[in-house]
Amino acid sequence: MTLRRFWCRYFLLSIICFSVPVWVAAQELKVAANQWPPYVDEKLLEHGLSANIVKEALIKAGYSVNFEINEWSTVLEKTISGDYDVIAGAWYTDERAERLAFSEPFITNDVKFIKRRGSGERFVELSDLNGLTIGIVKDYAYGPKFSELKNIKKHVKDSVYGSIRDLIAGDVDLVLADERVAIYEINQNIFGSFKKIEFLEKSFATRELRIAVSKKHPEHEAVTKAFNKAISEMKKDGTYDDIIVAHRINLN
């Protein structure tokens, strides 16, 4: 082979090599959440509604996702320490924001009152609750507005469906619960009971669910920015609405 032919072949080979895309493995994020159906549950489609949205958005943003379900206290502690990278659903507080970077909200939690169908209870202002017995769930964060109520009786249960069963039985006047959680619990545990209850129109509280990224992660700001962009794109192209519909959280 002549020197000229050698350099020609070398030149052609170089063009071919540099024309082939170089596939770089996506950065893996360790994403965690606590069990909270229908938002997070290992038995549900894509681990639940919020888990599905978060995973889809992060993948769309160019990351790979290693998803894990654990106790809330463990999820929070291990994300703050950097053992987990992302919490797939958390409420913002100033205290948490010192050690976690929060995204824009990706879903809203409406906390509403539920009454027996046809009963006279209403909620327009806080004084409407005076003298009522209200069913609530143990250790649920209803917020300071509810904690400060003085003229009510709080009837505590371990689950939303337990409170709703007491409502139907007449043991409480109202139940206060996350709307999607209540719908899920009714359909899973006391199917058909929606005919006996109804949600009051006005929300008692509205909470915004966000991802929280450990500030131990060197690119925490980039992760939240990429997630926000992906959510915006999913809402524009219909992916977001498709996920909501796929989880079918409605009164059957």
Image (cartoon, rainbow, N blue to C red):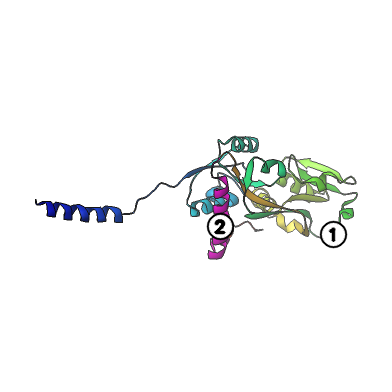
Q: Nearer the viewer, residue 197 or 84?
A: 84
* Amino acid type indicated by mark 1: Val
Q: Give the residue number, with chain letter if any, for mark 2.
A: 229
Q: Secondary structure at mark 1?
A: loop
- Please determine whether, in this image, residue 32 is positioned above or below residue 1: above
Picture residue at 67% right of the left edge, 41% below the top: 98
Q: Nearer the viewer, residue 242 or 113?
A: 242
Let me know if residue 236 is in the magenta part. Answer: yes
Picture residue at 77% right of the left edge, 50% below the top: 176
* Magenta-colored segment: predominant secondary structure: helix
Q: Earlier in the sequence, mark 1 or mark 2?
A: 1
- In three-dimensional space, the C-alpha distance between marks 1 and 2, rounded to whole angstroms, equals 37 Å
Q: Secondary structure at mark 2?
A: helix
- Magenta range: 217-243
* Amino acid type indicated by mark 2: Lys
Mark 2 crowdedness (10 Å alpha carbons): few <14, some 14-19, many ≥20: some
- Residue 74 position in % (x across, y down): 62, 35
Extreme residue in the front direction: 3
Let me know if residue 48 is in the magenta part. Answer: no
- Residue 226 position in % (x across, y down): 54, 53
Q: Give the residue number, with chain letter if any, for mark 1.
A: 124
